[in-house]
Amino acid sequence: MGNLTQELRIIILDINQLQASFARIEPHKEAFAAQFYTTLLENYPALRPFFVNVDLKRQQSSLLATLLALLNETSRGDELRAIFQKLGQRHADRQIRAEHYPAFGQTLLDTMAFYDPQWTPELRAAWASTLDQCVRFMMESYHPEATVYRVQVSRARR
């Protein structure tokens, strides 16, 4: 467990920075989550089949809860891994594959940039690294040999 926690701390860089970013987004959390899914489905129509018969309000709440878990469980690496492996299994059950995650990550980062008035390229890189690790954990539960997932950090929108 010690090595995993140390790896997470290196990858996540400064959890306080991410927590501060989310704290700036949180007062607008409902609008943030709604905009995220609206943008995701508009920009990536191929993902729409994954949301058939999905309650988007519940999905928005789930997104927010997952982000909070990520920020609160980071110091406990094994618990964080378990959370994201369980989420990964749910995604596997819906046939969500590795190639679908970059669209999610890109849209999430762009939406965070819109709602965080103190957004910087460094903050984008920190969130992207964190998302990368979480997706790796998710994929461990159904596609352990998939080790490549990268959110494009260079596309810094505001």
Image (tube, helix red, strand yellow):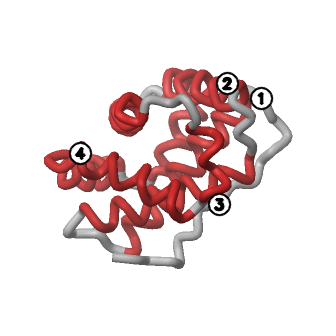
Whole-angstrom CA distance, mark 4 to mark 3, is 25 Å
User: Is disc 3 in contact with disc 1, using a CB cutoff of under 8 Å?
Assistant: no
Density class for disc 3 (Cα within 10 Å; few <14, some 14-19, many ≥20) is some
Mark 3 residue element: loop
Amino acid identity at mark 4? Lys
Q: Which residue carries the number 1 mark?
A: 142
N-terminal label among 3 and 1: 1
Alpha carbon separation for disc pair 3 and 1: 18 Å
- Residue at coordinates 59% horizontally, 60% vertically from top-left? 44
Q: Judge by depth and name the residue closer to the eye, 140 or 17.
A: 140
Q: Where residue 142 appears, x then y in whole percent?
A: 77, 29
Q: Secondary structure at mark 2?
A: helix
Outermost residue toward the front?
Answer: 53
Tag 3 and tag 2, C-beta contact below 8 Å: no
Whole-angstrom CA distance, mark 2 to mark 1, is: 6 Å
In three-dimensional space, the C-alpha distance between marks 3 and 2, rounded to whole angstroms, equals 20 Å
User: Mark 3 — residue?
Assistant: 150
Pinpoint residue 43: horizontal percent, then vertical percent: 54, 65
Circles 4 and 1 in contact, beta carbons < 8 Å: no
- Pointers 2 and 1 in contact (C-beta within 8 Å): yes
Q: Measuring 52% from the left and 24% from the top, which residue is drawn there?
A: 83
Residue for badge 2: 89
Q: Secondary structure at mark 4?
A: helix
- Estimate how packed mark 1 is, as few (under 14), some (14 to 19) or many (20 or more) residues with alpha carbons within 10 Å: some
Q: Look at mark 4 in the image and give the residue it sits on.
A: 29
Few, some or many residues within 10 Å of mark 2 (<14, 14–19, 20+): some
CA distance for labels 4 and 2: 26 Å
